[in-house]
Image (cartoon, rainbow, N blue to C red):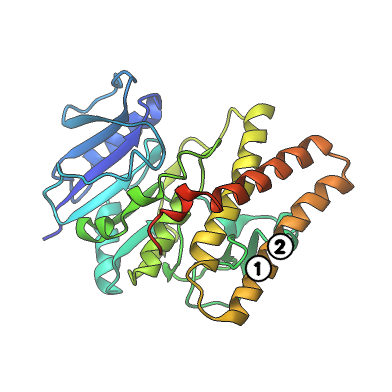
Amino acid sequence: MRDYIAVIRTLGQAGSKYWRLLNSLATQSIPPKSILVYIASGYPLPKETIGIEKYIYVEKGMLSQRALLYEEVDTEYMLFLDDDLEFPSNTVQRMFELLERDEADVISPDIFSNADRPLRSEVMMTLSGRMRARRNDDIWGYKVMRTGGYSYNKIPTKEVYLSETNAGACFLCKKKDFLRVKLHDELWVDAMPYPLGEDQVMYYKMHRLGLKQLTWYNHGFKHLDGGGNSTPEKESKRLYGDVYFKIVFWHRFILRPEKNKLLRIWSSLAISYMLAFTTISSLLRLRFDILKVKYNAIIEGVRFIKSEEYKRLPLI
């Protein structure tokens, strides 16, 4: 049976975007058995409603609001959602069809399309070691690189591709498979000065566990937020978080599990190149303010992976 429960993480402040999400769920050809909304403690419940949602207060955090046991869920499948999406009425039906057709475990739409990235940005990202476009790849959508960044399929021509990571705004999988990930072991992400990267942590753990995950292209999803309302202070924190996250993710998921000595050396060279590029590029542009942010992120990231707290984290 294709029974599922939709679970949404929110702060309750998405307004009309959240309303459009609820209506998308209400009009599905395969409707959810129920809608569970995990809202951060201390935030008021949204005024928007379709009358069937159940609210559950949890600790605030992008990862904390997802790293739950979901004892309220009594269906085999779960549809995980952020609060700012809109999608066609046949979306869930097609997700189930693709999972069954490809005998896969997880499916996620490519909501933030990297394939549309302009050539200049593509070249700069490649040189930085943070992101790389792949062409003529008929198998993979997204892959994790040894720098801690990822590569993406530049010219996807099929509806779905295998992937090692995905966007976390929406995905469908079995509850038992999600719980295998033990996402609560990764709460260090929410403890970062600017939490980000929780999606990559979750999906790459799925990949390491042997779960077959798909990236779904040409899906009809609309991301209604788009990451607006940026400020210089927020950008500075985001930049800090990006560098800090890359260091910790690289050490925890790339270097630490690697047994091959040559690949360990190669991995160390990869992260060294990425960090050198990001600091030298700021120096050459005389952006000493940004250089200071990146330097502090490197120092704190290295300090964390040497800490007793980090050493107590279960091995991948």
Circle 1/circle 2 CB separation < 8 Å = yes
* Residue at (23% x, 44% y) in the render: 6
> Is 38 on the left or on the right of 316, as rendered?
left
> Is 145 on the left or on the right of 60, as rendered?
right
Task: Name the spot of residue 94 as percent of width and height, x first.
Answer: 28, 60
Vertical order, 110 against 69 (above or below): below
* Residue at (51% x, 67% y) in the render: 256
Q: Quadrant of residue 150?
A: bottom right
Residue type, numbered disc 1? Ser
> Is 312 on the left or on the right of 112, as rendered?
left
User: In the depicted view, which residue is nearer to us: 309 or 22?
Assistant: 309
Task: Name the spot of residue 100 as percent of width and height, x first.
Answer: 24, 70
User: In the depicted view, which residue is nearer to us: 57 or 137?
Assistant: 57
Q: Which residue is mark 2?
A: 272
Instruction: Label 1: state its secondary structure.
Output: helix
Disc marking residue 116:
none
Instruction: Label 2: state its secondary structure.
Output: helix
Q: Which residue is mark 1?
A: 268
Query: The C terminus is located in which quarter?
Result: bottom left
User: Outermost residue toward the front?
Assistant: 308
Query: The N terminus is located in which quarter?
Result: bottom left
Residue type, numbered disc 2? Ser
